[in-house]
Every structure is written in structure tokens, then in C-alpha cells.
Image (tube, helix red, strand yellow):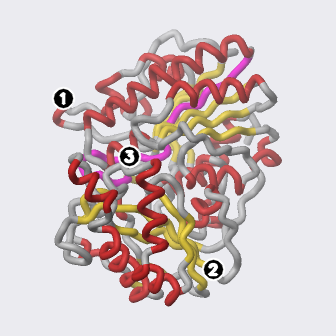
Amino acid sequence: MKYVMIIGDGMADMPIAEIGNKTPLEYLAPRSFAEIASGKLGRLRSCPPEFSPGSDVAFLTLLGNDTSKVFTGRSPLEAAGMGVKLKKGEVCFRLNLAAVSEEGFPGGIMLSHNGGGIEGDEAFGIITSLINDGGFSQVMKKYGLVVYPTNTFRHAAVLVCDDAGFILAPPHDIVGRRIEDFLPDGTMKQAIFEIEKASFESLNHHPINESRRKRGLLPANCAWLWGAGTVCTLENFADKYAVKGLVISAVPLVKGIARLGGLDAPDYPWATGLLDTDYEKKAQTAIEGLKNGYDFALIHLEAPDEMSHDGSLENKLESIRRLDERIVGPVLDELKALGDHRVLLMPDHYTLLSTRTHDATPVPFALYDSREGKNAQSRPFTEKACENEKVLETGDELMRLFFEKGG
């Protein structure tokens, strides 16, 4: 038996007036999604009420963890995905390259949580220039800050600190709002303020950002720290569910959760986490993995979530179309030659275009089993189609259902 889990990050939404008061899933009615929905439908409470909804909590839940027992913050999970091994007495942060308006820090407005989608050589150039900048490096030295750069807008930062009581706003939750209303609080609030302010002063007129402005792009002119956390330990997924698993994702958070759980999560240079990611490679990599010894493949597409945070209905719709046509459809076709298989399709959480933030509503899922064939009545995979289904309260319930492990 082969198992494939496909996650369209944040693709669930509420009805939107511009598309006839339908959700994106209802409006598009993706054909390949409907094939999976001919099986079993259900819902999962991926984000327990005591936590802020987000992919950190959701993916821990989706992969069978008891979030209330293992969650120590978002950034240690992301750091694990970047190869950073956190020690006791250290606090890790997610560092976003964000776009802030010309009014500066802290009087400006958060324009983009991801620096206008900066990636590749520009992203790496910005973050390495920041680390080496005289003014910023002095602030780093003052507070013992270490930054681990990537070639995306997502980076990791570590401070030596015994207290993880940081109160830091996720940048994707404050887009379009004044920064001064969301300044750091709690532990070392002055340090975090100085770090972010120094980053703006260093980056605002950086040559890469001036070039981006000339090309009509937003500048990546602020290093925004959030998601503070300490060392995290997870159960071994392979031992718990008796499968050898491969995770295909561009996102350090997802790769970190996978790796901490004993799953293989390689780095793929063609996976960007944005609308331009290589959809075909994701599908091909999953199938090749299943042909070469893996029992389980998880394919994660970040784009619907990013497009929701950007407030783009057009791009959210396009990301779901591409997921349907260029990942789900080809995977279903290829699986037929591999024998018996089960496919689980779902979002990790809702991401609402109306607010550009996450929502904790239980997420819909569809589970197809090739041995059972299609339901006599074809049905689309939508939030509404699942609204009367039972809500599973834990990810372990979902994984046991998926892998047929009983109660």
C-alpha cells in the first residue's frame, strides 16, 4: 500500500462576494480534487483553540503530534528545517525580510510580510549584507544575536536567553497596519526593537532594494523577528505509524517538523514556496520516492497561503488550479501503476482573503482508497461538502484513519 498526503496550505476560505459568494474551492470545483472526494470526507481541528492558528500548530497536528505537549514555539521547528540545532538556554526566532513603508521604523506601515516576495540571489544578498553591515553587526554583538541566512525571505535567528516570554506579532497578521501598534513586548523587548530598527536603517536604501523599487517591486527593508521558541522534541513518525516517509516542501517549518519526527525532508532548489514553484517536480519527486522504497509521501504547496496573505484572489485561485492540474491529477494517474493506494487531500488551516490571516475553523479533508473505488455519487471537495462531517479532534486520529491503524 502506498500513501500520499497532499496539503494545499491555507486553501480553505470563507465565501467571497467577487466570485458569487463562493469559496475558491467552490468556485473552481477542481476535477482531480473531486476524484479524491469520491471517497471519505471529514474535518479536523488542526489548530486547537488554546493556540493561535498557523502552520506551526497545524502541521504538528497533521503529523499526529499532541501540540499541547510538544509545542515550544514556531521558530525552533523552522530552525530544524534549516539545519540549525538549538541548545538549552537558547531562544530561536523566525526572521522575515519584510517590506515597510518609507515612514520608517516604527512609524511606517507593514506593506508585505515577505519583502514583496523576495527570493534567490536578491534575498541572500540582502540578508548577508545586513549581517555584515557595521551598524547592524554592532547591535548583533551587543545582544549576542546569530542569524542563519537562506535564499528566501525566511531566515532563522538565535539569542542566548533563559526566558522565552517574548510577545511578537507575526508580520503576515499586520499587513497594512502601522508597526508602532505592534511593537515587541515581554522578554528583551528593547533588544528586539533595536534589532528591527537597525535593520531598517541598514536596508532601506540598499542597492538591491533601490533596484527593486525601480522595477516596481517592494523593498525587503526590515528584518522582523517573531515566533520565539525553545528546543522541541517530537515522537518518531516512522515508528509510530510503521511507514517510511518522504516530505516534499519548500518551507523550513514543514521540513523541520518532518525531520524532528524522523521523516526525510530534502532541500529542493526548485521548490520556492511561492506561485512560481515547480509543480511538476513536486509530483514527480513524490512518485519516484514511492517507487524507490518510501511507503508515504507528503506533498506540500505553500502558494495558496502566500497568495492569501498577499490579498490576491486571482493568485489564490491560480495556485489552486495549478495544484489540481499539475500535482494532484498527475499523481493520481501515476499511482494507478503502483497498485493499492490511499490519498489524503486537505488544507492545513483556513487562510482568509478577507483578513489576510489564518482562521482556526476545522479544516475539510478527503480520503480516497483505490480498493474501494469511487463513490457512486461524484462530489466536489469543498468546505461546504464537509460541513456536516464529524470533526476529528486530534491529528493522531487522522493519521490512524489514514494508515488504517484502528482506534
Instruction: Say how many tags the image has.
Output: 3
- Residue 17 seen by the camera: yes
The amino acid at mark 3 is Glu
Quarter of the view holding residue 270: top right
Q: Quadrant of the N terminus?
A: top right
Q: Residue at x 70, y 40 (%)?
A: 400
Query: Marks 2 and 3, how far apart in space?
Result: 29 Å
Left or right, 152 with reference to 22:
right
Which mark is on residue 90? 2
Mark closer to the observer (2, 1): 2
Q: Decide which of tag 2 and tag 3 comes sooner along the chain.
A: 2
Mark closer to the observer (3, 1): 3
Left or right, 404 with reference to 318:
right
Q: Which residues are the magenta region?
A: 340-358
Quarter of the view holding residue 288: top right
Q: Residues within 10 Å of mark 1 (few under 14, many from 20)?
A: few
Residue 255: image location, x then y, percent:
62, 50
Mark 3, secondary structure of its residue? helix
The residue indicated by pointer 3 is 306
Query: Marks 3 and 1, how far apart in space?
Result: 23 Å
Left or right, 363 with reference to 330:
left
| 243 in relation to 51, above or below | above
Query: Marks 2 and 1, how far apart in space?
Result: 50 Å
Which mark is on residue 20? 1
Q: Residue at x 75, y 57 (%)?
A: 235
Is 233 included in the stretch rendered in magenta? Answer: no
Q: Residues within 10 Å of mark 2 (few under 14, many from 20)?
A: some
Residue 237: image location, x then y, percent:
75, 48
